[in-house]
């Protein structure tokens, strides 16, 4: 599995894994990993990132979309996104794919 | 942005009456709440069936009272609903919010799992050309609960035509489902089907009432069922959905079975009634007609009476049309007090004879005995005695509650026989 700790992965496309279900739940988004029943709660910003992880975008495009949506400085958004996507990947919720 | 791992809480499945009385007069056609409620139950009912004025004032509650509230909500399977009711309320301690939110998120995750499993099962039934009509929880989620996390669903109940049961079973077996070895065939549905992980049971029904309850014309259920967009299944007509929820509520409250010895989930069932009444386009005359035709009027009445006593706006004319001869309000209120507004297990008591010398039929239906085999009957008798021993010991410590229970059962059965 690629890690975002390495620069090579920064160009990778981020995609939600198959077998992970999502549902809005009173201002949060619940993710369920069907394989083992593990589940997670995302806040509003996390849910926005999750929605963008459809396999068509790389990290930089994610950052660009979030900066536009939340009117935040790119350097801060980028650091947060890298950490967050790393968490999602570690929890087997996301996968990194080679750039198209 | 945050990612919170909630997994340890995966799949969650004694109060003293303080004399607190909520007697609230609402708008016209709204019922008065006349039963005695503890503050904890008053708060739960505010979530289940809101009135113009809240029943509970929780501003000065201490930790012990909030603890009782959390336990009571869990017992009645209402923690997720209570979370939604209290969300953003600054008078509620943070620890209470946190506990309720965990329960809500667990329910949300489970509903995701169940929805996925349901769609898979319905797809398989459709591919096998088996008509499927959703019942109970699955039907309620599709009609009365916009937020599926608010309604705990323990299993998936699906009605299929009696002559298609074998095909339906085969379709689900192909998905990896199998019958639980210990599960016998109930009168109205096949043995529950589960997968290896045992997180979900699917019950294939061919009927919605037990033989002793009434005579439901399932053809009517199918004829008035509502189609859904993807055409994989049907939903019951609003009146039939409410009727089934009411029959189930009364069945669970009557006692007399080792499986129905407590009030767990009683208020969740009242909530089901409240949601159907609030959200579904009900024709009350149709409901009354079906209940009478199928000889379920006493059972439907008792559930609607209990719901109205607790604040659900059930129209008085419909209730009057279903009222059994000889019904006394105090019997209905006793049902509410003993079988709804309580927590804890109780000894099911139908009669002393039923307790000590159960019929072969009781042993066959509830305890898997072979009626003609003496040894099998003896083993079933021992299993039953062993299972009920702890409750018998508890009952001996509270003999008056046993007397009350037995009296209530007798009164309710007399009502049923009178209709």
Image (cartoon, grey):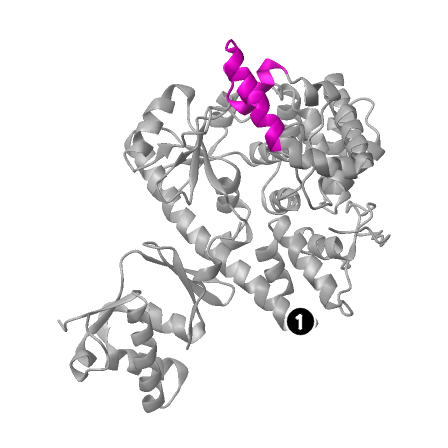
Q: Quadrant of the N terminus of chain B?
A: bottom left
Q: Quadrant of residue A60?
A: bottom left
Magenta: main secondary structure equals helix
Q: Quadrant of residue B297?
A: top right
Q: Looking at the image, which is closer to me, B100 or A12?
A: B100
For the point 34% across and 68% down, which residue is it? A51
As drawn, B182 above or below B34: above
Magenta-colored span: B359-387
As drawn, B258 above or below A49: above
Q: Where is residue B106 shown, x and y percent of the image?
A: 49, 57
* Chain letter of the residue beneath label 1 in the structure image: B
Residue position marked by numbered label 1 in the rendering: B93
Q: What kind of element bears circle 1?
A: loop
Q: Is residue B378 magenta?
A: yes
For the point 18% across and 78% down, which residue is it? A9
Q: How many marks?
A: 1
Q: Quadrant of residue A49?
A: bottom left
For the point 18% across and 84% down, which residue is it? A7
Left or right placement of residue B193 versus residue B154 in this view: left
Q: Looking at the image, which is closer to me, B77 or B247?
A: B77
Are there few (<14), some (14-19), or many (20+) residues within 10 Å of tag 1? few
Q: Where is residue B86 shown, x and y percent of the image?
A: 64, 64
Left or right placement of residue B389 versus residue B380 in this view: right
Q: Is residue B247 magenta?
A: no
């Amino acid at each position: 599995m690629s890690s975002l700790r390495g620069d090579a992965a920064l160009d990778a496309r981020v995609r939600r894994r198959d077998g992970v279900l999502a549902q809005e739940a009173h201002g949060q988004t619940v993710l369920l990993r069907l394989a083992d029943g593990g589940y997670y709660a995302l806040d509003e910003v996390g849910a926005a990132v999750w929605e963008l992880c459809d396999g068509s975008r790389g990290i930089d495009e994610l950052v660009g979309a979030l900066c536009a949506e939340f009117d935040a400085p790119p350097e801060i958004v980028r650091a947060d996104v890298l950490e967050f996507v790393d968490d999602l990947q570690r929890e087997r919720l996301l996968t990194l794919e080679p750039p198209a | 942005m945050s990612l919170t791992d909630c997994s340890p809480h995966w799949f969650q499945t004694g109060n003293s009456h303080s004399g607190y009385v909520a007697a609230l007069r609402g708008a016209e056609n709204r019922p008065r709440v006349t039963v005695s409620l503890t503050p904890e139950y008053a708060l739960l009912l505010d979530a289940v069936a809101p009135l113009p004025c809240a029943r509970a004032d929780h501003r000065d509650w201490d930790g012990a009272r909030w603890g009782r509230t959390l336990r009571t909500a869990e017992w009645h399977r209402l923690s997720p609903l209570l979370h939604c009711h209290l969300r953003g309320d600054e008078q509620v301690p943070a620890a209470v919010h946190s506990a309720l939110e965990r329960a809500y998120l667990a329910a949300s995750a489970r509903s995701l799992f169940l929805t996925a499993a349901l769609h898979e099962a319905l797809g398989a039934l459709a591919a096998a050309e088996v008509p499927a009509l959703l019942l109970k929880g699955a039907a309620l989620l599709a009609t009365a609960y916009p937020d599926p996390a608010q309604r705990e669903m323990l299993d998936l109940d699906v009605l299929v035509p009696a002559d298609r049961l074998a095909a339906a079973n085969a379709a689900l077996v192909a998905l990896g489902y199998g019958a639980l070895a210990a599960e016998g065939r109930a009168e109205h549905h096949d043995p529950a089907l589960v997968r290896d992980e045992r997180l979900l049971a699917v019950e294939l029904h061919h009927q919605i009432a037990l033989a002793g309850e009434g005579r439901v014309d399932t053809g009517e259920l199918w004829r008035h069922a509502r189609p859904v967009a993807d055409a994989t299944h049907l939903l019951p007509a609003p009146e039939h959905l409410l009727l089934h929820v009411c029959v189930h509520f009364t069945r669970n409250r009557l006692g007399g079975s080792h499986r129905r010895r407590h009030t767990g989930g009683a208020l969740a069932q009242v909530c089901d009634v409240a949601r159907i009444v609030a959200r579904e386009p009900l024709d009350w005359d149709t409901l009354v007609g079906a209940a009478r035709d199928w000889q379920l009027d006493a059972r439907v009445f008792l559930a609607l009476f209990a719901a109205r006593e607790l604040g659900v706006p059930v129209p008085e004319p419909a209730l009057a049309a279903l009222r059994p001869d000889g019904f006394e309000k105090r019997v209905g209120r006793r049902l509410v007090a003993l079988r709804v507004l309580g927590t804890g297990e109780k000894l099911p008591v139908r009669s002393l004879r039923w307790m000590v010398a159960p019929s072969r039929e009781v042993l066959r239906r509830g305890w898997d005995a072979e009626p003609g085999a003496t040894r099998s009957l003896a083993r079933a008798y021992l299993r039953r005695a062993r299972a009920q021993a702890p409750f018998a010991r508890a009952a001996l410590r509270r003999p008056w509650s046993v007397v009350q229970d037995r009296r209530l059962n007798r009164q309710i059965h007399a009502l049923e026989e009178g209709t």
